[in-house]
Image (tube, rainbow, N blue to C red):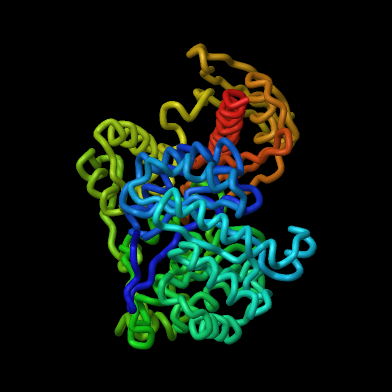
Amino acid sequence: MKKSSDNKVLIFDTTLRDGEQSAGIGLTVEEKIDIAKQLERLGVDIIEAGFAASSEGDHEAVQAITKQVKKPIIASLARCVPDDVDRAWEALREAAHPRIHVFISSSDVQILHQLRKNPEEVLDMAVAAVEKAKGYCEDVEFSPMDATRTDIDYLYKLVEASIYAGATTVNIPDTVGYALPSEFSRRIQDIRANVPNIDQAVVSVHCHNDLGNASANSLAAVQAGARQVEGCINGLGERAGNAALEEIIMAIETRKDTLGLSTNIDTTQIYRTSRLVSDITGFPVQPNKAIVGANAFRHASGIHQDGILKERTTFEIMDPQSVGWKNTSLVLGKLSGRAGLRSRLEDLGYEISQDQLDSAFEAFKDLADRKREVTDADLDALMGNQRRIEPGRERYKLEHIQVSCGDHEIPTATVKLKGPDGKSVTDAATGTGPVDAVYEAINRIVEVSNVLTEFRVNAVTEGIDAIGDVTIRIERKGETYVGRGTDTDIIVASAKAYMNSLNRLLTMEEVRSSHS
């Protein structure tokens, strides 16, 4: 169990649990493992790997992560219900550093209308759950949900009782993003002053962004004595999201003069982590996003540009390289070899085997034949494509596309796919446009009914030869599946994205049928 010193803030990442609750995100076990491994490289102290009792998929994911990620604490969420605690431990029992995180509603509005119990019953349930969790592992976290709208005297009782029952971390969640920074700071101060045994537990905070104050509230709590902060990469999460961990981390790092605090984070891994999470979830990072947005270290104003050219610190409070942005790059083209590609990928934070390098090099040479120079952003896009087509993740493989269209022609597409049996199948279809025609042709082969709910195109790089990044979402039987594809040909990128989403759909349905 990790302890926080007076000047060390523990970083608790809940991207795989609360982040996955973002509407439109559904991660496979393999994707969760990929993210968990990158979070380990980033240096987060605790990874909340899932809510084991919520589904077989979450239980399997938590269990798989415990086997492959050993440095951080691995946590599973559980309601203050005996079966939930049991399921959490079943998933966590192989973890090197397990934590059971139990929670229960504490505000009057949630106790009355959601739990339909009285405060005394809730207190008893909380104590019983903490005690049961403590019987399984030493590290137990307790969260009184909606703590910022909870009667303060009742909150004191809950926190005190949970610590006596064995909680080693008490988390104060601003579950609905209601608090203002000054209010939240005062609440943390009051808890630390009025709960007699508070020194026996780490005080944590978990802030939502409904009013846009999640990061500010988290930092206010840290200044008031909280020593664990919970949040998600890129600010993902329920509704408007959670506190963006990259913002919290870099605020602590940049303002050591005022805060006098530190974390265990390798900040140079921040950008790589942000890109991976965005790529897997299909949630783009807005250009003006703090720390990791495309414009975070770009300067358009003439005055700003003049200042930066004379002295970087005139308009930059952080060194871009400190969060993983690269100021310089090795120019790659069609004459570049494997050694140059490996070197650049390693500079960008990719750890690849020889087999992965060979596969990536093949795709790189194909890209370099179509582009004069291959940029870092192109390489990120290329590696995203490579990750999505790893063996075992695709039931159907896109082999060939041919499209005919024009203002006086009916858009027609011919598509060739390799199926699960290794045989290639070709079919053709018409549509309202070239992309629609491609999707109709794919549907004729795969024969899986679905509804396209989102189609979005972004340029990865600038120029006429820019790589197009297509993100789509499809829906089937109430479940949403995201797909992404990149290519210099936007029609091909669209086909790759659709195949990515269909393969995810087929994989997830196979998993569900195996558990039924």
Task: Out of 373 and 416, give the one closest to the viewer.
Answer: 416
**Would you place residue 498 above or below residue 128 in this image?**
above
Residue drawn 38% across the image and 61% down it: 270
Position of residue 223 measured from the top left corner of the image (x, y, whole percent): 45, 83
In the picture provided, is 318 more to the left or to the right than 396? left
- The picture places residue 486, in percent across and down from the top left corner, at 50, 42
| Location of residue 442 with respect to 311 vertically, above or below | above
| Farthest-out residue, left | 339
Which residue lies at the image location 39% right of the left edge and 72% below the top edge? 250
On the question of residue 402 being in view, the answer is no
Which image quadrant: the C terminus?
top right
- The N terminus lies in which quarter of the figure? bottom left
- In the image, taking residue 89 as reference, residue 316 lies left or right, namely left
Left or right, 282 with reference to 256: right
- Residue 210's place in the image compared with 488, above or below, is below
Q: Nearer the viewer, residue 328 or 288?
A: 288
What residue do we see at 65% from left, 68% from top? 146
Viewer can see residue 450: yes
Residue 342: image location, x then y, percent: 24, 43
Quarter-wise, where is residue 93 in the image? top left
Q: Nearer the viewer, residue 213 or 221?
A: 221
Residue beneath the point at 70% across and 23% down: 429
Q: How many numbered marks does the figure carry?
A: 0
Q: Position of residue 380 (x, y in %)?
A: 40, 49
